[in-house]
Amino acid sequence: MLNRYLVYMAIDLHEQGLLLLRQALDNSTADFRPGQWEAIQELLKERSLKTSH
């Protein structure tokens, strides 16, 4: 059950990120470049670890 929740959260974050990217670029078809979303995920993970201590 927890794994499904984490997958849902990851998809939701990706969708939110994509929405923000498209709004910022004023381009409804914009998409992340290869590796760009993965880099954002790493930054979010690092930040989460820092704030949880």
Image: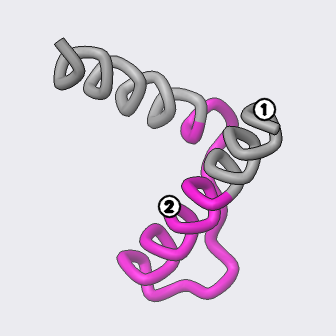
Image quadrant in which you'd find residue 51: top left
Give how far across and how far down residue 18 sits, in percent: 57, 66
The magenta region covers 12-37
Give how far across and how far down residue 25 sits, in percent: 42, 77
Image quadrant in which you'd find residue 4: top right
Going by the picture, which residue comes out furthest to the top?
53
Q: Which residue is mark 2?
A: 17
Give how far across and how far down residue 15 sits, in percent: 63, 65
Quadrant placement of the C terminus: top left
Q: Please name the amino acid that badge 2 sits on.
A: Gly
Compared to 48, does 50 lie above or below? Answer: above
Q: Please name the amino acid that badge 1 sits on.
A: Asn
Compared to 17, does 10 lie above or below? Answer: above
For mark 1, does the 10 Å Cα neighbourhood hold few (<14), some (14 to 19), or many (20 or more) residues? few
Residue 49 included in the magenta stretch of the image: no
At 43% across and 72% down in the image, what residue appears? Answer: 20
> Which of marks 1 and 2 precedes in the sequence?
1
Looking at the image, residue 7 sits to the left or right of residue 53; the answer is right
Of the pair 15 and 32, the residue shown nearer to us: 15
Of the pair 13 and 32, the residue shown nearer to us: 13
Q: Which residue is mark 1?
A: 3
At 33% across and 18% down in the image, what residue appears? Answer: 46
Quadrant placement of the N terminus: top right
Q: CA distance from mark 2 to mark 1?
A: 21 Å
Of the pair 27 and 47, the residue shown nearer to us: 47
